[in-house]
Image (tube, rainbow, N blue to C red):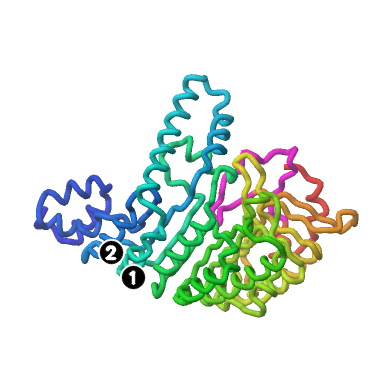
Amino acid sequence: MDKLPVELLRLIYSYCDPKSVRGLREQTRTLADVGYEYLLSSSFTAVSWRHDIDRLHCIALHERLRGSITSICIFLGELSFYDAFTTSWFQHFITPPEERSDLLATARREFDRIAEGSKKVGPLHLKSDDLREACSALPNLQDFEVTFTQCPLDNDVLKDVFDYPNCRKLDRPQTYSNLDAIIFALHGVPLRSFKADRFPLEVFRLQAHRNHWFTHAQSFESLSTLNLTLDPSGLQGPSSAFRAVNGLGRFLQLAKNLSHLKLAFHPYSSENSKFALSFRELLYNFTYTQLTDLILEGVSCEEDDLKDFLARHGTTLVRLRLGGRGLAKPFEVSLGGIHLYEGTFKSLFTGLRTKLPKLERLHLEGIFECEHHDLPSHEAYNFYPLTSENWEGVPRPSWVRSSRKTINCLPFEQYVLSGGPYPGNSLTQQNY
């Protein structure tokens, strides 16, 4: 095989799994040399119970391996033992007792192993210098994700309970320090995308932390994709929320070249609620001049405020998603909709027909509701999803049933894109 062209050897390697790559490299020096670039996956995942940051640091300092890593995902999620155990027990209530005991015992051993490993490794922020050196030394690093909800575990019992928001716990002070370590590590790194699925909103209220983020997030100007799911549970009172939103707005304006933006609010302290947001206070008159894709979820706002924000991006906006799953449990309807405390959805969607001339897709998911319950203009809808956030079709959820009065958003999408009679009045009475 040594006599084969390098291009053909690379083609062979491209079809090999990691074990086959290692075996093939052991055959000859030529195969070992060509196979170097296939030793590592382009995506690196770090968890709290392994010495993954040390491993990443070693890779970043290796002259030939450092170019392999293009994306990093850091998992910072934790389970609440009592909530996880209770939920698991009820999930397997009809399982035969002996089998249920074995399942839960295996999960308990895995939980203890993870807890013990996390104690030995220590929190992420203690490795901030190594993480920064590693990120700075990876020439092809483009995508960075911080996840608290996407469980990387192999144990099915633990993986299942991680889908229940009440089973996840968050040490907020430690999370602040860990997130500070991450943004410190990304100082000067020209990323393409940054994602975080449970970002404590109060980080942008606390002076030391918000200044730290403003200082080290200057390179976010290179971002084209920013996905932020914010947890406002740590905010207390209107003044606290105002300062946090003000800080969030300053941070969002650093990423001025975005083409894809997701802004979601998941209040873990009250899973059914929406976060009151003023887009005027958040971004003033700031406009993303290249924004094509926008996702807004879990927001309570004024109709005119939301309409004005969307209209400012009318010259570029192609795909718009309002709402999402929110903090719904697997068997519940989607919770992350939109609430209007002033105005109506009929007026909102009618206005968008002329203000978003380039819009090609509109998707609605979750509970949509406006105020004035006693008036004929009151609207309330419960939308189930038709596509993923990547606009790929999804199967009809198992929780959709006639008693829940869930509907899909196709008539509203058609109304905004093509006109016709407003579908709201009839659809509020339909069952799906």
Report, in whole angstroms, how far the alpha carbon at label 2 lies from the one at label 1.
Answer: 8 Å
**Three-letter amino acid code at the position of disc 1:** Ser
Residue annotated with mark 1: 136
Measuring from the top left, give residue 133's x and y in whole percent: 32, 68
Q: Earlier in the sequence, mark 2 or mark 1?
A: 2
Specify the farthest residue to the right.
375
Q: Is residue 213 left or right of residue 71?
A: right
Quadrant showing the C terminus? top right
Relative vertical location of residue 395 with respect to residue 264 in this rendering, above or below: above
Q: Is residue 121 magenta?
A: no
Q: Is residue 400 magenta?
A: yes
Q: Residues within 10 Å of mark 2 (few under 14, many from 20)?
A: many
Q: Nearer the viewer, residue 230 or 169?
A: 169
Magenta stretch, main secondary structure class: loop
**Three-letter amino acid code at the position of disc 2:** Ala
Residue annotated with mark 2: 60
Measuring from the top left, give residue 3's x and y in whole percent: 9, 57
Measuring from the top left, give residue 267's x and y in whole percent: 64, 54
Q: Is residue 380 left or right of residue 40?
A: right
Q: Is residue 383 left or right of residue 342?
A: left
Relative vertical location of residue 82 with respect to residue 408 in this rendering, above or below: above
**Contact? badges 2 and 1 (CB < 8 Å):** yes
Where are the magenta residues, as a range?
Answer: 385-411
* Residue at 48% from the left image edge and 40% from the top image edge: 159
